[in-house]
Image (tube, rainbow, N blue to C red):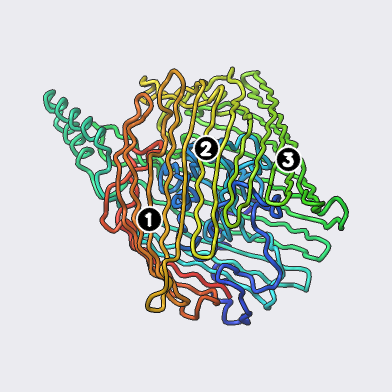
Amino acid sequence: MLLTRTTLYSASLCALSLALMAPAHAQQGSATTSDDDFHTEKEIVVTAPYVERLDILSGTSALSGEDLAAETQGQIGDMLTNIPGVSATSFSPGASRPVLRGFQGNRVAVLTDGIGNIDASNTSADHAVTIDALTTERIEVLRGPAVLLFGGQAVGGAVNVIDKRIPRAVPSEPIHIDALLGYSTVSKEYSGGASVDVPLSDRFVAHVDGSYRKSKDLRIGGFLLSPELRAEALDVAADETALGNVAEAANARDWAEFRGRLPNSGVETWTFGAGGAFIDDGGSLGVSFNIYDTVYGIPERPEFTEPVGGEVSIDLRQYRFDLRGEVELGEGFLDKARIRAGYADYTHKELEGPDVGTTFFSKAIEARFELTQNEQGGWRGASGLQFQTRDFEAIGDEAFLPPTRTNQLGLFTLQEFSIGNLDTEVALRFDHANLEAQPLGITRKFNNLSAAFGIGYNIGDLKIGANISRTGRAPSVEELFSDGPHVATQSFEVGDPTLRSERSWNGELYARYDSTRFDFTTTVYTNRFSNFIYENDTGNIVDDLPEFVYLQRKANVWGVEAEASAQLGHAAGFDVVVDGVADYTRATIKGDGPAPRIPPLRLQGGLELQSGALDLRGEVEWTDSQTRTASFENPTDGFMMVNASVTWRPFGRDKNISLIAAANNIFDVEARRAASFTKDFVALAGRDFKLTARFSF
């Protein structure tokens, strides 16, 4: 690229400044609801773009508007943990990916407007998700048969992020601005993001956005190390003292007693994006370009005889181009033809102090074409094809992967039938994957057929139903070809080039009730794998690093998730609302015991007072300890967090201006995420006071 980092950084700040100054020149339109940022009468379609008109049987969970602003974090994984069945990898403040029903990595699809995020976050827990939460419009968690539209590998589900870079509507005002500003005390983080949409005519609209976020080391509520590692550090201190190694013994004691801060956990991220679209009654066509740039520290796996600290960090940048288009096909059998495509050039460097240890390069393109059907007597659906090609290379003394090329092709259909109170869905998908490691002379080809069937029955406000699916997932290049030290994860990873496709039977039963004053959703699910691929800690030390080997065994997973809310009444000008969330997952690998890094039982309850101008909320989250652990995996202590927030709308609920003040982890408890690869030496945030301002003009 000819543009320097300084030039790109300046462009991002210019875009942000423009967005913040522009309200002085804008005309205020009439907003519809507080969650609708665009002042336009045209509905903004956001729900899973390729199935937006289908009644997805197992439903979606979504964050948008004020709810999204209140949950905004540096990484998408940490934003979704209040949704039932969702946890996070929480590798570090700079890298966290969603965990759905205990599944992570390649078993969870993270999408941007219906296609892959085209980064490397699914390949390793230390890789950041290249999604800018500050300019995101909506985030959805999708489960059930419709997930097959996005890939047979997503047995846990899909997270679809709707951004604003390719406009979906022409604003009714001369210029439209959205902005989000925030400050958090727990890491002294300040952040700002803004986007501007300008109608160039009644059919053309241009878009520009930018964001910046910077944080220092995270403050934590207790000790840096888990109880097991603290005990180990004290044992090392005693041994070194007996040997007369005074400095080494002091270092080990420092590790054991270190508390209150997560060293080397600062993050600096900036983004810049621009796009435009032609929007007409007969269809639309839009393009966009964006840059995501971040540098973040990787907390150090303890070396007890060395000083507390860390020098490993990741310097990551992604350039991305996107295209989205659709054409209305009339009132016959077919409704619309859609195309969605993206290209990304991704690079990240794993730094050891100022020195580059390993550099990862990834260039990939993903595209999908889809035809949707008009409803014909209760029957409607969508069918299409999807392909991706990716070149991946790691260069450096500690490159643990050979250069690889991956080509994937998928064909899919989802059909929905409604007869009276009965709804059914049928989904089919065929995937072909070709994975080649050129230096090794190895090429693996995989063909997988996946199918799903869902049925739901409506009884007034209650809907009950069941989904069953058979899915197949090809192994990833990391699972097949890894062989060497991975500095950022601080592990020695060993793949298996003979791995077979991972296949599973999956089922769920659900009940959903939705009325004016009360609603609830309960789901029980199970997954049975014939050849589950997992990363096993062997207990061996190779090149001073713990060894992790990819294995394949039978596995069983089951769990339950539930959420409910009720409006209790009206008092002192406020609606009184209570809500709750519960989830639990249990996973067992045949012949090897509990699966690693599975979230434990969690219960969460909240009380909220709501009015047009002011909302007051308090909530308690209780997370059980996790003692069902894999070999050489330490248990995780339980914890209880208390949070509170106030949302003020100075001009009322109908105007898109709100200020949110939140106090999280009020009692400053020590907490760790059981699903995290780094849970023994990376704790969650301590007491935090957070201010967020959301504007839309």
Residue at 21%, 34% in the rendered image: 252
Looking at the picture, how far across and down is residue 669, in whole percent? Answer: 27, 50
Nearest to viewer (mark 1 / mark 3): 1
In-front residue for pair 28/54: 54
Query: Which label's residue is closer to the chain start, 2 or 3?
Result: 3
The amino acid marked with disc number 1 is Gly
Residue at 38%, 75% in the rendered image: 571
Task: Estimate the spatial distance between the alpha carbons at disc 1 and disc 2, rounded to whole Å.
Answer: 22 Å
| Quarter of the figure with residue 436 | top right
Task: Estimate the spatial distance between the alpha carbons at disc 2 and disc 3, rounded to whole Å.
Answer: 28 Å
Q: Which mark is residue 605?
A: 1
Residue bearing mark 2: 525
- Provide the secondary structure element on which disc 3 rests: strand
Q: How crowded is the residue under tag 3: few (<14 C-alpha within 10 Å), some, or many (20+)?
A: many
Nearest to viewer (mark 2 / mark 3): 2
- Provide the secondary structure element on which disc 1 rests: strand
Task: Estimate the spatial distance between the alpha carbons at disc 1 and disc 3, rounded to whole Å.
Answer: 41 Å
Looking at the picture, how far across and down is residue 55, in whole percent? Answer: 67, 52
Residue bearing mark 3: 386
Q: How crowded is the residue under tag 1: few (<14 C-alpha within 10 Å), some, or many (20+)?
A: some
